Amino acid sequence: MFPTAFAHSLPLSLVSAALFGIGSGAWAILHLAAVTTYFGRRNLGTVLGRYLCIFNLTGFSSPALTGFLLGAIGDWTVQLLLLGVVSLVGALSFLLMGEPRTVPAAPAGRRDGRPIF
């Protein structure tokens, strides 16, 4: 989002938007794979439920915060820079997580060992 904050031409804005779209499309799949890799399948429903709750709350509140800042400041530069900083912090924290530990897979069937059918 940093190039978009300083783009003063249509071609640069389009290139920046295209790169952001490619990154967002990749993230749509990769973050679910990363959660599965780091936490395993045993508690995947619980982990994804908590993770996606926070993810969706920020996605819900971001447009209101962006609109408030636009009304208060009158320029998109601050919002785009803020988004870029938050994205960099997220990327760096992901890179610093290290190697995932091995988590045993959930056994097939019910928890008491009886078959499903």
Image (tube, helix red, strand yellow):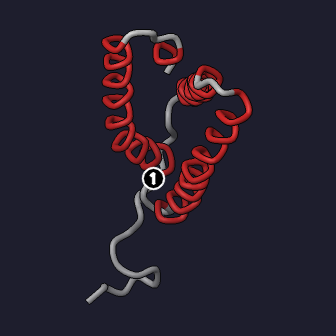
Few, some or many C-alpha atoms within 10 Å of disc 1 (few <14, some 14-19, many ≥20)?
some
Looking at the image, can residue 96 be seen? Answer: no
Q: Which of the pair 26/74 is nearer the observer?
A: 74
Q: Which of the pair 63/87 is nearer the observer?
A: 63
Q: Which of the pair 70/81 is nearer the observer?
A: 70
Residue appearing at x 34%, y 22% in the figure: 19
- Which quadrant, please, contains the C terminus? bottom left
> Tag 1: residue type?
Gly
Q: Which residue lies furthest to the left in this view?
A: 117
Residue appearing at x 31%, y 85% in the figure: 115
**Element type where label 1 sits in the image:** loop
Is 3 situated left or right of 13 in this image?
right
Q: Which residue lies furthest to the bottom in this view?
A: 117
- Considering only vertical position in the picture, is 76 above or below 110? above
- Considering only vertical position in the picture, is 43 above or below 84? below
According to the picture, the residue beneath numbered tag 1 turns out to be 40
